[in-house]
Amino acid sequence: QALAASMPYPVNKRLEHGLEHGHHPSPGATAEPASAEVTASTLSEGRASRKLGEGLPSIGHNPAVGPLDRVRTDASAQALTTNQGVRVGDNQNSLKAGLRGPALLEDFILREKITHFDHERIPERIVHARGSAAHGYFECTRAVPELTRAAPFQTEGQRTPVFVRFSTVAGERGSVDTARDVRGFAVKFYSDDGNWDLVGNNIPVFFIQDAMKFPDLVHAVKPEPHHGMPQAASAHDTFWDFVSLMPESTHMLMWVMSDRAIPRSYRMMQGFGVHTFRLVNAEGESRFVKFHWRPLLGTHSLVWDEAVKISGADPDFHRRDLWEAIEAGEYPQWELGLQVFTEEDADGFSFDILDATKLVPEELVPVVPVGRLVLNRNPDNFFAETEQVAFCAAHVIPGIDFSNDPLLAGRIHSYVDTQISRLGGPNFHEIPINAPIAQVHNNQRDGMHRQAIHRGRVAYEPNSLGGGCPFQAGAQGFVSFPQPVYEDKVRGKPQKFAEHYLQATLFYNSQTEVERRHIAGAFRFELSKVTVPAIRQRMLASLANVSAELAEEVARGLGMDVPAAMPRALDEVPDPEVTESPALSLTAHPGEGGIRSRKVAILVANGVESGLLGSVAQTMLDQGATSRYVGLRVGPIATANGEPIDADASMENSPSVLFDAVVLPGGEAAVQALAADPHTVPFIRDAWLHGKTILSIGASSTLLGMAGVMATLPTGEPDPGIAQVGPDDAAHACSWLVNAMAQHRHVERERA
Ligand code: HDD
């Protein structure tokens, strides 16, 4: 078997054609595999569980490791079978009446295989179809039983298994990762008290205030229904038509047009629960809460031109990044912070905490860290886990409760409902990735794809025949917070919901100059794709309420004048508590420094001087970063020193947008070869335009000139992201490279 696997061609291909034995089934499937030696499968428990880290959850507690054993399959040393467990003799040929005769209807093996294949796809998620996920755990770093009785927050050091799925919103399942879009950040906690899903985004506010508008929003942003375009993009008429008619979306638009919407990595973005939720403690006391995830690597973004080019070079950029980081043991981590406030605090705020288009500024209510999230294991199977995971805003546990946010109310209904069609029935909670660790006992029965085999005749409550079981848990169970409600039934919104611009202005004013420029650039790009001038006009009128500077900048980019500001819904604007919030700028979250998991491209060609390159590669390894030799082609490179190196990427298959920094090598012959290749100039120029660190060794400085790279900033200062070093300057070169890369990006290079 081992031999067969290593052969470049199928060993007994001839027999498939009946040339030697006519009617006999092909070998390879006729008997037990020759090799008795069974090697550990890459999917086996041992391998998976080692990545869990120290302490809890131990094997048996993590539903994704212990209990999933019963559904894990491992085909090593096993014969191929039908779904009924019948061994298949020939997996190459359908059953025919003679070698050249007609296929036979009785071929149940072929029919089973094709029938199953015909039904392999399930409906994709109506939103957030494109996503990537990983297993891990949440560790409580500060117990808060005084705030909540929720199981994950009871003891310091306690770990709760989680499954986390990141996603884009608008694109279809196969769409690109780096589209300008909100990112989903959905966390399923498999707590001892049941599953809790915190289904958030990487942006703390939302487009709309009421779930009633969600289908309209999604219809507007999805590809236009008549021609199915554009894919994974909001830059089209229907989206801007809708949002320009919905001033409540203005705050969210600021975020979506900012660098937040093109993250460098899923590992480098914040997450937010968005709505105001409730925490409830064992005494039944409740406070409001907002959930914040903060990445330890800091929040970092792409630049737009880079994001667009990555879409072509690697549409799976974020999926690959997450997968590779976890495989490399670079487990992404986030800190969970809580903003906790009382009902009285909330009543005093100038905005309504039930309005999902508003955030609670950190300057008003600080974020208190209570735990950390670690993602340390990739899924075994994309479909079984990432695709079939069902997050539901309705999944809360004792200690977590809802607020009256009308957007949340709609979500509580929508998620369970959508899984019923997406996952084929009401038993989706039994799919292994969705099954809680906590035991499930109730009298719900039957339905499509039921897995549980319930014993006995009692499926009702109250009962005496079953000893009254399963029994109600009373105060031990989930008890809704008894918020008093004495109101008329109405369709409408409270007055504070009518203020649409103050926090949009707060966000814009809290950005750095570069960030503001990017926001203006994004509005310009998106609105320039809008074909109906009245929509552009209306959007500019709305922006005029946010910032005169922004409205003018965008109008200039569209060749228009700023129109009169859109009339506001509210005549008297309240005084905001906070007018500038540094935490809203990405620069406020640089992370822990260092360059762990960053990627460096080292350009190589025959004749390259390899000495310093080796030091760079070693330094990257020491720092937890990775380097790749990128050549004119892949394969062996003859170096000037005679030490052979292998280019494992080429400028054609891996342009510089896929890297965080570029090293240009010394060696006359190599530099000449690079200079003659048409990929070299765009490779270097893009790295420069996108603000990346560039280290040039020896003779390669001529390449900088060819690529039009300017070593000075617009201010006339030297560019801190470009260094030219001699071939013997290893120590200086390496330490400079590490420091320059730790800046992430040299945005000061950007020309206005
Ligand atoms: Fe939603 C999926 C986040 C409003 C209805 N939503 C979905 C996912 C995330 C969010 C991260 C993907 C989960 C996964 O990875 O499987 N959604 C949000 C946030 C919202 C929000 C942060 C606002 C604060 N969503 C929202 C509303 C509704 C929905 C108002 C409907 C009334 N969302 C859905 C859905 C989805 C979904 C249709 C599609 C697939 C799914 O649920 O499982 O039910």
Image: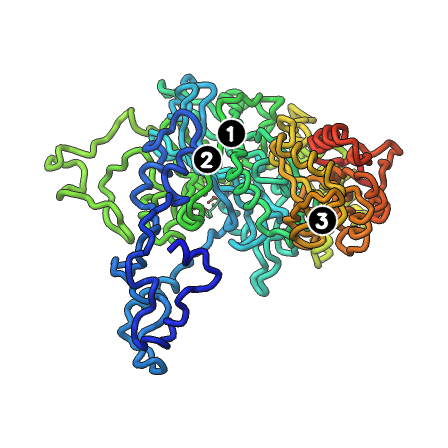
**Residue at image coords 87%, 31%:** 717
Label 3 residue SS: loop
Give the quadrant of the N terminus: bottom left
Residue 289 position, x and y percent, is 49, 26
Label 2 residue SS: strand
Mark 3 vs mark 1, CA separation in Å: 55 Å
The residue lying at 34 percent from left, 32 percent from top is 59
User: Which secondary structure lies at badge 1?
Assistant: strand
Work out whether residue 509 or residue 199 is closer to the camera in this orientation and state it: 199
Q: Residues within 10 Å of mark 2 (few under 14, many from 20)?
A: many
Q: Which of marks 2 and 3 is nearer the N terminus?
A: 2
**Of 364 and 305, the residue lying toward us:** 305
10 Å crowding of disc 3: few (<14), some (14-19), many (20+): some
Closer to the camera: disc 3 or disc 1?
3
Amino acid type shown at disc 3:
Ala
Q: Is residue 511 visible?
A: no
The reply to whether callout 2 and callout 1 are in contact (CB within 8 Å) is yes
Q: Which residue is drawn at 31% across and 74% down?
A: 95
Residue 640: quadrant of the picture: top right
Is 44 or 262 nearer to us in this picture?
A: 44
How crowded pointer 1 is (Cα within 10 Å; few <14, some 14-19, many 20+) is rated as many
Q: Does the residue labelled 3 lie within 8 Å of ligand 1?
A: no
Residue 527, percent across and down? 71, 51
Instruction: Name the residue tied to disc 3.
Output: 638
Mark 1 sits on what residue? 291
Q: Name the residue under label 2.
A: 198
Q: Distance between the residues labelled 2 and 3?
A: 54 Å
Give the amino acid at mark 1: Phe
> For residue 586, which quarter of the picture?
top right
Disc on the earlier residue, 3 or 1: 1
